[in-house]
Amino acid sequence: MKKKRIGLYPGSFDPVTNGHLDIIFRAHKLVDELVIGVAKNQKKENLFSMEKRKKLILHEINKSKYNKKSFKVVIFDGLLMNFAKSINANLIVRGLRAVSDFDYEFQMTGMNARLNSEIETVFLMASEKHQFISSRFVKEIYFLKGEVKSFIPKNVLIELKKIKN
Ligand code: ADP
């Protein structure tokens, strides 16, 4: 039997945006199973709990037309490459929005390749429509009372509205 190809798409997803979802469903075409790794990041200021972030991603996957069994959403802590190895990932998927993402991603990919040269990192370009979406700006705009509904799924907006500001 052919070995299952496992992809890992890591990120903070605080919260998941239409940009992330675009990458999730496009990356899914490249592998047999896509693991969305929700990273605990001590440095970043978090808005949603890990569980809530996971739940919001799962909700969108369940709503989609794709086979739910070929996705997993997993919370992880610690070094990305250790996590990737523990789930037998063949490749890591990252999204690229603008030139500004490139420098950081380039360095990280280089370091990760040194840590484990068996796992490739592939980049998917943000689609034109979603290029400027980031979780950070969604939060900023929302709390400044701007309109964010075109950047995030409906369910995320409902959760944002529950947060007092
Ligand atoms: P953010 O920078 O929005 O907080 P994450 O840390 O959750 O996002 O990012 C996870 C991955 O998804 C990164 O590779 C990031 O470049 C990518 N990504 C985030 N938003 C988009 C988007 N709108 N289009 C394409 N890729 C994106």
Image (tube, helix red, strand yellow):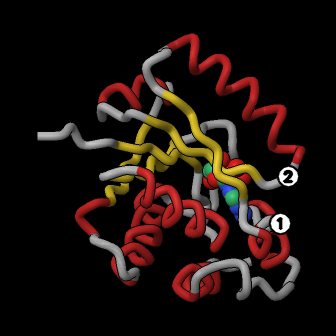
The residue indicated by pointer 2 is 98
- Given contact means CB atoms under 8 Å apart, are the residues at marks 2 and 1 in contact? yes
Image height of 47 relative to 116, above or below: below
Q: Residue at x 53, y 63 (%)?
A: 26
Q: Quadrant of the N terminus?
A: top left
For residue 144, side relative to residue 4 (left or right): right
Residue 57: image x %, image y %? 45, 68
Residue 51 or 86: which is nearer the viewer? 86
Under circle 2, the secondary element is loop
Q: Residue at x 75, y 24 (%)?
A: 107
Earlier in the chain: of badge 2 and badge 1, it is 2
Q: Quadrant of the C terminus?
A: bottom right
Callout 2 amino acid: Ala
Could you tell me how far apart the alpha carbons at marks 2 and 1 are, in whole angstroms?
A: 8 Å
Image height of 44 relative to 56, above or below: above
Residue 95 or 159: which is nearer the viewer? 95
Q: Residue at x 30, y 28 (%)?
A: 86
Mark 1 surroundings: few (<14), some (14-19) or many (≥20) residues within 10 A: few
The residue indicated by pointer 1 is 132
The residue positioned farthest toward the top in the image shown: 114
Under circle 1, the secondary element is loop
Residue 107 visible in the picture: yes
Residue 89 or 74: which is nearer the viewer? 89
For residue 113, side relative to residue 129 (left or right): left
Residue 121: image x %, image y %? 56, 34
The disc placed on residue 94 is none
Residue 29: image x %, image y %? 43, 60
Q: Residue at x 18, y 40 (%)?
A: 2
The residue positioned farthest toward the left in the image shown: 1
Quarter of the image holding residue 135? bottom right
Callout 1 amino acid: Phe
